[in-house]
């Protein structure tokens, strides 16, 4: 299975259009010291031709240009077979409506994510006005086979598991499964990847689950719990925003460094996070603990 990180920034991208924090200032001045990043998304494929998106970001058009595959013969070609969602947050779903020209789109989402998209953000009704939308349910803790637009098996299964997090702030009801992590499994090679771009805590059971995979792509939104507060950008802590910070005794770096088997890569990184700086002490701490900071275009074969 091929996995490509298409976008590795949190909502807003990096540098963020309205942000002049110290990290965005470096990113604007010298992009070699802090690579530009588009908003959180990934793509998976077995054959390198038929790709499935993990979330659809507002940068989806730019991101799809980066997908490998042979040149299309026809006058129109949709380079994605389907979109698998981890939640209904805007940075993970606005791209659905931006793909409306596809005429036919396939989504895979938990029932809870589906109802927020139907009722609250209304992205599904809006998209349906332009395209024929097929939505397949991925009930929690169930391995669901991914099927291409032509009905053929992609030889990849997806399993959703609930992660500790609150629902999007515009959700009017909350049901279990509004925010999930995904395990993608290659049915032929057995290779597996955990995709967890938003997660508020790492409990023992989740650490054990991640340890059974080959690749963990994990929430690297914030370095410290008070990152937005100390910069005068926001008044909520990372944990209050349902993002476990990287640093600290109970932070994700310390907890994930004990997960020995998989390769571990941070994604969904906020523009304020000093790990974005290639030469920062925080970046060195991540690397020294055996983890990596994801960047757009990073790819893996499992
Ligand atoms: C998040 O990652 O917490 C959300 O995407 C927040 C947002 O939409 O700004
Ligand atoms: Mn986000
Ligand atoms: Zn910034």
Image (cartoon, rainbow, N blue to C red):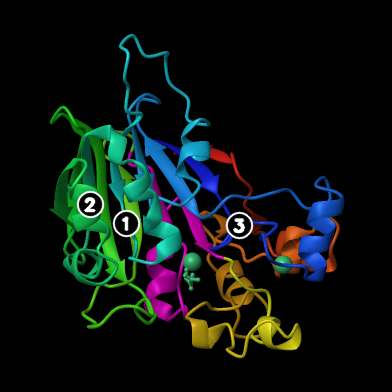
Numbered disc 2: secondary structure: strand
Residue at 34%, 41% in the rendered image:
99
Q: Is residue 115 or residue 285 the one in the foreground? A: 115
In the depicted structure, whether residue 229 falls above or below residue 70: below
Q: Residues within 10 Å of mark 2 (few under 14, many from 20)?
A: many
Q: In the rendered structure, are the residues bearing label 2 and label 3 in contact, judged by CB atoms less than 8 Å apart?
A: no
Q: In the rendered structure, are the residues bearing label 2 and label 1 in contact, judged by CB atoms less than 8 Å apart?
A: yes
Distance in Å between CA atoms under marks 2 and 1: 6 Å
Q: Is the residue at mark 3 in contact range of ligand 3, meaning its CB lies under 8 Å from it?
A: no
Residue at 19%, 54% in the rendered image:
143
Residue at 61%, 68% in the rendered image:
257
Q: Is residue 41 left or right of residue 141?
A: right
Q: In the rendered structure, are the residues bearing label 1 and label 3 in contact, judged by CB atoms less than 8 Å apart?
A: no
Please state the horizontal and vertical placement of residue 258, each as a whole percent of the image. Answer: 57, 70
Q: Residues within 10 Å of mark 3 (few under 14, many from 20)?
A: many
Numbered disc 1: secondary structure: loop
Q: Which residue bears the numbered disc 1?
A: 85
Q: Which residue bears the numbered disc 2?
A: 108
Let me know if residue 218 is in the magenta part. Answer: yes
Please state the horizontal and vertical placement of residue 164, each as a whole percent of the image. Answer: 38, 80
Q: Earlier in the sequence, mark 2 or mark 1?
A: 1
In the depicted structure, whether residue 96 falls above or below residue 269: above
Give the magenta range.
Answer: 190-219
């Amino acid at each position: 299975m091929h996995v490509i990180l298409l976008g590795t920034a949190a909502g807003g991208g990096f540098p963020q259009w309205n942000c002049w924090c110290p990290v965005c200032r470096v990113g604007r001045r010298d992009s070699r010291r802090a690579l530009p990043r588009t908003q959180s998304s990934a793509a998976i494929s077995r054959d390198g031709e038929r790709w499935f998106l993990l979330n659809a970001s507002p940068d989806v058009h730019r991101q799809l240009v980066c997908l490998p595959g042979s040149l299309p013969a026809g006058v129109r070609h949709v380079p994605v077979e389907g979109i698998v969602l981890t939640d209904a947050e805007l940075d993970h779903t606005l791209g659905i409506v931006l793909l409306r020209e596809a005429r036919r789109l396939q989504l895979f989402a938990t029932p809870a994510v589906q109802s927020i998209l139907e009722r609250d953000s209304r992205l599904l009704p809006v998209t349906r006005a332009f395209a024929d939308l097929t939505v397949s349910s991925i009930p929690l803790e169930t391995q669901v086979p991914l099927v291409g637009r032509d009905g053929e098996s992609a030889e990849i299964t997806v399993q959703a598991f609930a992660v500790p997090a609150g629902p999007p702030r515009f959700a009017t009801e909350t049901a279990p499964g509004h925010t999930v992590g995904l395990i993608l499994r290659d049915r032929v090679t057995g290779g597996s990847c955990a995709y967890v771009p938003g997660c508020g805590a790492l409990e023992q059971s989740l650490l054990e689950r991640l340890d059974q995979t080959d690749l963990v792509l994990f929430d690297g939104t914030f370095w410290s719990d008070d990152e937005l507060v100390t910069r005068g950008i926001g008044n909520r802590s990372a944990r209050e925003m349902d993002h476990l910070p990287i640093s600290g005794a109970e932070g994700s770096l310390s907890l994930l460094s004990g997960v020995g088997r998989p390769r571990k890569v941070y994604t969904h990184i906020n523009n304020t996070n000093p790990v974005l700086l290639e030469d920062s002490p925080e970046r060195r701490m991540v690397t020294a603990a055996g983890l990596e900071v994801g960047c757009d275009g990073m790819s893996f074969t499992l």
